[in-house]
Amino acid sequence: MSAAGNQSHPSSEQSVPEKQSTIDFLASHGGPFYELQRRMNLLQERALRTGRRALLFVGIAWFVPLLLTIPSLFSAAPTVTTYLSDPGAWAKFMIAIGAFVLAEQQVERGLRHKLRQFMRAPLIAPAATKDAIIAVNRALRQRDSRTAEIACLALAVFASVIAYANWEHVATSSWTVTVTPDGNQVTLAGWWTIFVSLPLFVFLFFRGVWRHLVWALLLRRIAKLELRLVATHPDGKGGLSFLAEYPNAYMFFVFGISAAIAAAFAKHLMQETLSTGTFTTMMGAWLVVVLAFFAHPLSAFSKPLAMLKEQSLLVLAAKATTFQRAAERKAIGANVAANSAEEAAEPVEIVDLGKQYDTTRKLSAMLINRSAVLPVAAAALLPFAVVGATRLPYKEVFSVLKKLLLL
């Protein structure tokens, strides 16, 4: 186990490892919530047990409210049916929470492999290794931040307060609220949702977003280091193309968020006509948000790649001029322009740089591209496609989905 793994049980920011000597980052380890789960034997340092925890959290958030609605079967207004027909409950408390937990293993493995590639290549210059380790240790402190998780919990509590305030003004009864002449009364299932289900959903969401921001900041710090990039690398990205695929590690996480948002749209669209134009705009806007979320950390490498391309083309152009003038002298005995006896006497290494120059010209400073992020893009759009299919013909939905994925 790496140094990061052996020291990933901090209970506060001050207990984060300060002397890690390797470049390793376990995105789903560390932090107060991780420690709480470890002490409850829900996970171990070497095993996140995402499948088991996903079932447990879904059971707590979605199945318990279902059980609490069962007594209403014996009343005049049963709420089991309204609970099972509520897309928001399914999306947030079953699909999203399950997806957030399942994503932990996938995210940790994906990000860890990408970071290790920097040293495997190696892409970080030896002189910058110390700074890279400092950047990783800083990221570990941010990952394990007690303050950050308290802020996530505060946002979860705030979301519950907002939900409760909204329930006081609803006009029709549901599985969460019973409307009476004396005022709205929150049901047992509603209270459980306020105190448990909704806070858990919001907390896991913001915790996941925070940890991605930590990763994003780490990448942006690495981008400022001295990197051993090669303009003629066959990947067309200076040797960094592997990074463009890291968003796919967030497939489950993005799918969970998309399901919750799509369900919110579904509630508003049930009584309205959904046009193809509105549907396309809705999906396109969400896809832009998702891609921008992941493009931000990758954009930090655009500057070093652009500089690499510019400088490499200048050097290759100068070398090519020397070589081509020598080839010209050999072919016709002298240079047509600015012929010089001193230049002719200088030894010239016969190397044709044309292929290297053409390859360098094709170097792209943008890491993110359609083919690299196609899986995560599909995960972002699929829940919206399902919602759209309830209001639009399947052929139209498939056509919109295909067009957006081909952009």
Image: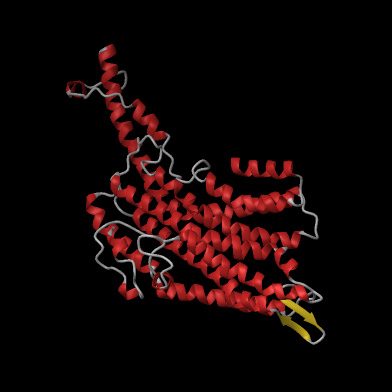
Residue 176 seen by the camera: no
Q: Residue at x 80, y 83 (%)?
A: 180
Q: Residue at x 51, y 75 (%)?
A: 153
Side (left or right) of 301 relative to 192: left
Query: Is residue 407 positioned above or below 216 on the image?
Result: above
Residue 53 seen by the camera: yes
Side (left or right) of 59 relative to 109: right
Q: Choose between 400 and 4: the one closer to the eye.
A: 4
Which of the 4 quarters of the picture holds residue 16? bottom left
Q: How many marks?
A: 0
Q: Residue furthest bottom?
A: 182
Side (left or right) of 214 relative to 344: right
Q: Residue at x 70, y 73 (%)?
A: 69
Which of the 4 quarters of the picture holds residue 5? bottom left
Q: Position of residue 148 (x, y in %)?
A: 44, 72
Query: Is residue 396 positioned above or below 331 on the image?
Result: below
**Quarter containing the N terminus:** bottom left
Q: Residue at x 33, y 31 (%)?
A: 317
| Colouring convention used in this rendered image of the protein | secondary structure
Q: Position of residue 251 (x, y in %)?
A: 52, 52
**Quarter containing the C terminus:** top right
Q: Choose between 248 and 100: the one closer to the eye.
A: 100
Which of the 4 quarters of the picture holds residue 17? bottom left
Q: Position of residue 269 (x, y in %)?
A: 76, 59
Q: Choose between 163 and 318: the one closer to the eye.
A: 163
Query: Is residue 324 positioned above or below 119 on the image?
Result: above
Q: Choose between 357 and 325: the one closer to the eye.
A: 357
Side (left or right) of 391 relative to 332: right
Q: Residue furthest front?
A: 74
Q: Position of residue 398 (x, y in %)?
A: 68, 42
